[in-house]
Amino acid sequence: MKKEDILAKSRNERSDEYEQKIINDAQLWGVIILAILCMFFTFTPMLYADIQGLEKARTVYEFPAILFAYTSAINFYSFHKTKTRMYLVIALCFCLGSLAFIALYLINL
């Protein structure tokens, strides 16, 4: 293989790494915004009920269920690709949390 071919291949690999980093950063910002919105929609009815002096606020279990399911899916996928047990443990914890919030949501319909 010629020196020019090796350099060209190396440049292409760096570009792929940079593109992957951008995608990873975008996914990170996406989950941050998702978490902020879920927390906002979870706590707003509680604060509103408290300000209005209502006895009971509307239950909001759907947003934590969505956030936990999203985080679980990310970690299951990471485990599938890397076979790192930490991802599996985190995925299972978030999956159980999501199932608990879904059950609470269905019970309180």
Image (cartoon, helix red, strand yellow):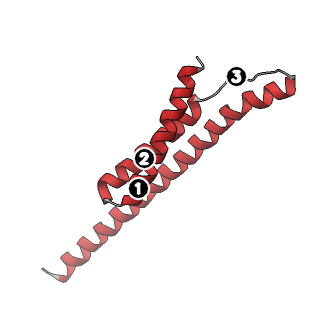
> Residue 67 appears at what percent x and percent y?
53, 39
Q: Which residue is mark 2?
A: 92
Question: Type of residue at label 1?
Answer: Tyr
What is the three-letter code of the residue carrying label 3? Arg
Q: Height in image: 74 above or below 47?
A: below
- Which callout, 3 or 1, points at the residue further toward the start of the chain? 3
Camera-side residue of 36 and 65: 65
Residue 44 is situated, as x and y percent measured from the top left of the image, at 73, 31
Distance Cα–Cα, label 3 vs label 2:
28 Å
Q: Nearer the viewer, mark 3 or mark 2?
A: 2
1 or 2: tag closer to the N-terminus: 1
Marker disc for residue 87: 1
Query: Disc number at residue 58?
Result: 3
Does residue 55 lie above or below 12 as drawn?
Answer: above
Quadrant of the image occupied by residue 62: top right
Mark 1 falls on what kind of element? helix
Indicate the quadrant containing the N terminus: top left, top right, bottom left or bottom right.
bottom left
Q: Residue furthest bottom?
A: 3
Q: Secondary structure at mark 2?
A: helix
Question: Which SS class for mark 3?
Answer: loop
- Residue 74 image position (x, y, % from top left): 42, 47
Which sits in the foreground, 28 or 43?
Answer: 43
Q: In percent of the image, x 43 and y 48: which residue is there?
A: 91
